[in-house]
Structure formats: C-alpha cells, structure tokens
C-alpha cells in the first residue's frame, strides 16, 4: 500500500504532508513524497548543469522539506521520494497508478473567504480523473502532528448522501475512519427545492413533506442495518446542497467530510458539481471517493 503526497514546497503542501504521514502510519503503508518539474525548466537545467541535474536538486529539496516538516524527527514509516517531469496532474496520476497508491493526499490550494474559495487547478484535474480516493486538505492550517490532534479537530464526520447505490460504499469508508478517531458520523441528505418549469403550475404543498419522510426513512433503514458503533446520526434538510453541507459541517464541528466523486456516462471517475462546490466552499478536510473504489 502507498500513500502519495504531491508537494509544491508551500506551507499548504507541508500541512498535506503531515496528514499523509499519519494516514500512512495507520495503514502501514509507504509514504511517497513527490514533486513535478516543469519540462521547460528541466530542459534549461540540463543545458546548464547536465541531464538529470534538476531531478537531483529536486530530490534533495524534497528530502530537506520532509525533514523540516517533522523538525528532524520523521515519523516511523517507510518514506520514498519521487521526482517527475511533465504536466503535474498527469504525473501525479501516473505515480499513483505505478505505485499502486490507495490514497492521494494534497492541498486544495484555495484562496480565503467562503465565496472566493476555489480549487487549485492541479487538484481539480486530479479529482476529475482519479481512480483512488483523494484527501483534500485545507490550505490555511498547519496540519496535525499526531492522531490526537485529529481527534481534537474532527469532532464529527459528515457524510453527504444522495440515497443512491453508492451511498453505502461512502458510509463504509467513513465508518472505518470514525473507528480510528472515535468520532460519530452524521449522514446528511439535502433536498433541493422543486422549481416549477411551467408558469402557473401548482406545486402540491405536501410534496416536500413526502420527500423528507421518504429520505428520513431510507437513512434510518441504513442506520439500523449497521453496527451500533461508531454512532450514526441522520439529518435531512432543504436547500442548496453544497451550501447546506458546508454550513452543517461548521455548525456541528465536523472536521472531515467524506463524499463521493460521482461517475458520468463516460468511463472513469468524474467530479460531480455538488462535490466540486463543497470542495470550493468548505474550510475543512474532504475525503473524495471515486466510484467503485476498492
């Protein structure tokens, strides 16, 4: 097993590296710390210092960045360093496939402000094509030094669900994490308001009540099928899904959101619009799961 952590030597990627180290330690996995060189820069470096000179420099910088991140006291895990040249998202996905990574950990690289947040272009492209889970870390925090730090910040795990076939897969992944962190899970289903397409069309007043009742029943049935621990709660609300999920995560101190990357009609994983908006407006951790991940 391998946890892949791409970095760009920023403080945001330093935080992602700390999350990656904890994930690797708990899975007994190898942590692969990687960076991707620009092809034009690599060509210029080869002309000035010989072929491979930029790769050698980048590897030394990776090793130093890793040592500095952990103050010279590296975690007790196996660590490998990888340097690639090319388009960052393509190379990250290639490294993940070649190293049989079961998790990619990388920063969202977003700006600040709930309406100004946006995914970094590299992170977005990785999410749109990944076939393995991606833990997206917030850019404005230092990251944890130990699992105890996670337990203090992740008081609850929030799982947005669509009541589709992939729901149980997502909940199962959240339950595994909740068992480690001793945190309850909050299942949230957001009902979007019905907008009449035909002018003057009467909207039945009882439709919202029926939709809520049906959703609550399905969530309760799921909870009853699962073991009592970790504890699961359910919440059904009305509104715009991404906004409601971000608001509930903040109000309920859910330091981690676990949600799916919904598939399109095309082969491979694709990021759904709700997932993208949640990643864009939340300030917390998001574990994004591609369809049918192992």
Image (cartoon, rainbow, N blue to C red):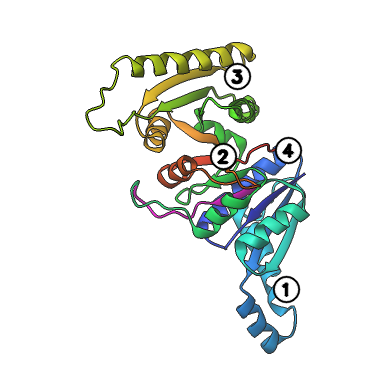
User: Is label 1 in contact with label 2 (beta carbons under 8 Å)?
Assistant: no
Report the residue marked by disc 1. 56
Local SS, label 3: loop
- Report the side of 36 relative to 153 (left or right): right
Instruction: Compare marks 2 and 4 and give the one earlier in the sequence.
Output: 4
Q: Which mark is residue 230?
A: 3
**Can you give x and y, in whole percent of width and height, for residue 89 in the image?**
61, 60
Residue at (65% x, 42% y) in the render: 22
Where does the magenta region start and end? 104-113
Instruction: Give the Cα separation between the discs numbered 1 and 2.
Output: 39 Å
Q: Residues within 10 Å of mark 1 (few under 14, many from 20)?
A: few
Q: How many numbered discs?
A: 4
User: Is label 2 in contact with label 4 (beta carbons under 8 Å)?
Assistant: no
* In the depicted structure, whether residue 219 falls above or below residue 130: above
Instruction: Give the Cα separation between the discs numbered 1 and 4.
Output: 30 Å
Q: Which mark is residue 27?
A: 4
User: Was residue 242 drawn as part of the magenta stretch in this picture?
Assistant: no
| Closer to viewer: mark 1 or mark 2 | 2
Instruction: Compare marks 1 and 3 and give the one earlier in the sequence.
Output: 1
Instruction: Give the Cα separation between the discs numbered 2 and 4.
Output: 25 Å
Instruction: Give the Cα separation between the discs numbered 1 and 3.
Output: 47 Å
Report the residue marked by disc 2. 262
User: Is label 1 in contact with label 4 (beta carbons under 8 Å)?
Assistant: no
Instruction: Compare marks 2 and 3 and give the one earlier in the sequence.
Output: 3
Q: Residue furthest left?
A: 200
- Report the side of 165 relative to 199 (left or right): right
**Can you give x and y, in whole percent of width and height, for residue 164 in the image?**
56, 27
């Amino acid at each position: 097993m391998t946890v892949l952590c791409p970095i760009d030597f920023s403080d945001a990627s330093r935080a992602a590296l700390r999350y990656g180290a904890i994930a690797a330690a708990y899975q007994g996995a190898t942590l692969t710390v990687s960076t991707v060189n620009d092809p034009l820069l690599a060509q210029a470096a080869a002309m000035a210092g010989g072929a491979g000179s930029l790769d050698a420099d980048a590897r030394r910088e990776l090793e130093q960045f890793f040592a500095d991140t952990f103050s010279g006291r590296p975690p007790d895990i196996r660590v490998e360093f990888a340097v690639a040249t090319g388009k960052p998202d393509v190379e990250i996905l290639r490294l993940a496939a070649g190293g049989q990574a079961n998790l990619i950990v990388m920063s969202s690289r977003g700006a600040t402000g709930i309406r100004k947040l946006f995914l970094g272009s590299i992170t977005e492209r990785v999410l749109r094509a990944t076939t393995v889970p991606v833990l997206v870390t917030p850019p404005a925090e230092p990251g944890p030094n130990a699992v105890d730090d996670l337990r203090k910040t992740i008081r609850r795990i929030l799982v947005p669900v669509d009541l589709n076939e992939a729901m149980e897969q997502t909940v199962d992944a959240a339950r595994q994490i909740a068992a480690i962190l001793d945190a309850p899970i909050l299942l949230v289903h957001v009902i979007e308001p019905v907008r009449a397409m035909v002018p003057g069309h009467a909207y039945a007043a009882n439709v919202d009540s029926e939709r809520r009742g049906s959703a609550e029943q399905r969530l309760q049935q799921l909870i009853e099928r699962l073991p009592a621990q970790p504890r699961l709660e359910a919440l059904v609300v009305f509104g715009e899904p991404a906004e409601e999920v971000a608001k509930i995560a903040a109000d309920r101190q859910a330091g981690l959101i676990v949600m799916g990357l919904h598939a399109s009609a095309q082969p491979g994983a694709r990021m759904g619009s709700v997932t993208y908006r949640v990643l864009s407006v939340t300030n917390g951790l998001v574990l994004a799961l591609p369809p049918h991940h192992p």
